[in-house]
Image (tube, helix red, strand yellow):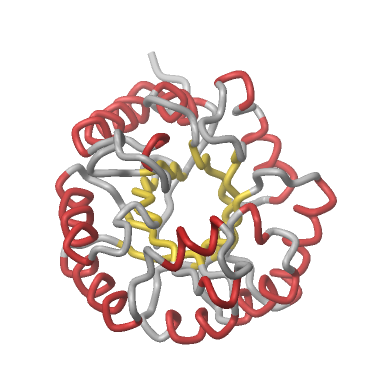
């Protein structure tokens, strides 16, 4: 996972929009490679370990699980396409087997930001960490960062995030990106739950070094994260706009 000041790292968030279909996930990874993503992200959630039996969340995640063998195949495919690949997991046993697949980093979702034992364990694995800050207050971010650094891991990136689906434009607060950079001395990006590509484009000017956006083969489908996702054509447009924003931002050196 390589993040630089002049090339935004673009994550195509597949999550569980494959709905448990390996064939759909294969198509999504192939599309992500075609439209120029830097990485793809899955969600690897053991429904039995993370949700109440027969709850809506349990049914959603249980019905969209990929087996360890299927997940390994998706990792191999993404890497063969030149993509980084990683995932979000909610329990240590799942993390243990996924880590053997050599993810490019680990993502700590907004809902796990206060799960300090999990964060400490992830930090101990020595991989880069992406920490999403939706719903978090300052003290919670402070504790998460302190926990990671106490484990000897300083490869941290924060993602400004608004945990609304979709997130209204007036809730995105992109100005916080530079504030987070100053405070924590780490890479900061934007996990975009808004509709369209305008916020992602603007976030480059606000200092985002990473942009994460949900991806679906059919955003019109019901359920999962389809409704806040871009299709392949729109994701390609977003990547092109991000690259244009990088050109527009130019250099911090004054030139004639």
Based on the displayed image, in which of its 4 quarters is residue 174 positioned? Answer: top right
On the image, the x and y values in percent for residue 119 come to 67, 70
Quadrant assignment for the C terminus: top left
| Front position in the image: 6 or 211 | 211
Residue 45 horizontal side relative to residue 108, left or right = left
On the image, the x and y values in percent for residue 218 come to 25, 39
Based on the displayed image, in which of its 4 quarters is residue 102 positioned? Answer: bottom left
Residue at point 66%, 61% (across, down): 112
Based on the displayed image, in which of its 4 quarters is residue 109 positioned? Answer: bottom right
Residue at point 50%, 80% (across, down): 94
Residue 241 horizontal side relative to residue 144, left or right = left
| Front position in the image: 215 or 51 | 51
Residue at point 37%, 26% (across, down): 197
Residue 115 in the image: above or below residue 173: below
Quadrant assignment for the N terminus: bottom left
On the image, the x and y values in percent for residue 182 come to 70, 41
- Residue lying furthest top in this view? 256
Residue at point 50%, 86% (across, down): 96
| Front position in the image: 53 or 241 | 53
How many marks the image carries: the answer is 0
Residue 2 in the image: above or below residue 89: above
- Residue lying furthest right in this view? 139
Residue 126 in the image: above or below residue 9: below
| Front position in the image: 1 or 63 | 63
- Residue lying furthest front in this view? 54
On the image, the x and y values in percent for residue 85 come to 34, 64
Residue 177 in the image: above or below residue 210: above
């Amino acid at each position: 996972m390589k993040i630089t000041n002049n090339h935004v790292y673009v994550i195509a968030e597949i999550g569980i929009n494959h709905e448990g279909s390996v064939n759909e996930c294969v198509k999504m990874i192939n599309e992500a490679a075609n439209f120029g993503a830097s990485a793809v992200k899955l969600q690897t959630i053991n429904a039995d370990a993370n949700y109440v039996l027969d709850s809506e969340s349990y049914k959603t995640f249980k019905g969209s699980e990929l087996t360890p063998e299927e997940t390994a195949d998706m990792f191999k495919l993404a890497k063969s396409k030149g993509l980084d690949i990683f995932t979000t997991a909610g329990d240590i046993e799942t993390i243990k087997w996924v880590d053997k697949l050599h993810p490019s980093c680990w993502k700590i979702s907004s809902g796990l930001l206060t799960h300090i034992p999990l964060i400490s364990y992830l930090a101990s694995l020595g991989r880069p960490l992406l920490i999403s800050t939706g719903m978090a207050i300052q003290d919670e971010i402070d504790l998460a960062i302190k926990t990671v650094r106490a484990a000897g891991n300083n490869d941290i990136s924060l993602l400004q995030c608004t945990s609304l689906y979709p997130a209204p434009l007036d809730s995105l607060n992109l100005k916080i990106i530079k504030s987070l950079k100053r405070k924590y001395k780490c890479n900061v990006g934007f996990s975009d739950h808004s509709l369209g590509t305008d916020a992602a484009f603007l976030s480059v000017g606000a200092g985002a070094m990473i942009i994460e956006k949900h991806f679906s083969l059919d955003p019109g489908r019901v359920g999962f994260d389809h409704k806040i996702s871009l299709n392949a054509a729109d994701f390609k447009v977003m990547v092109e706009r991000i690259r244009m924003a990088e050109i527009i931002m130019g250099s911090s050196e004054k030139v004639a």
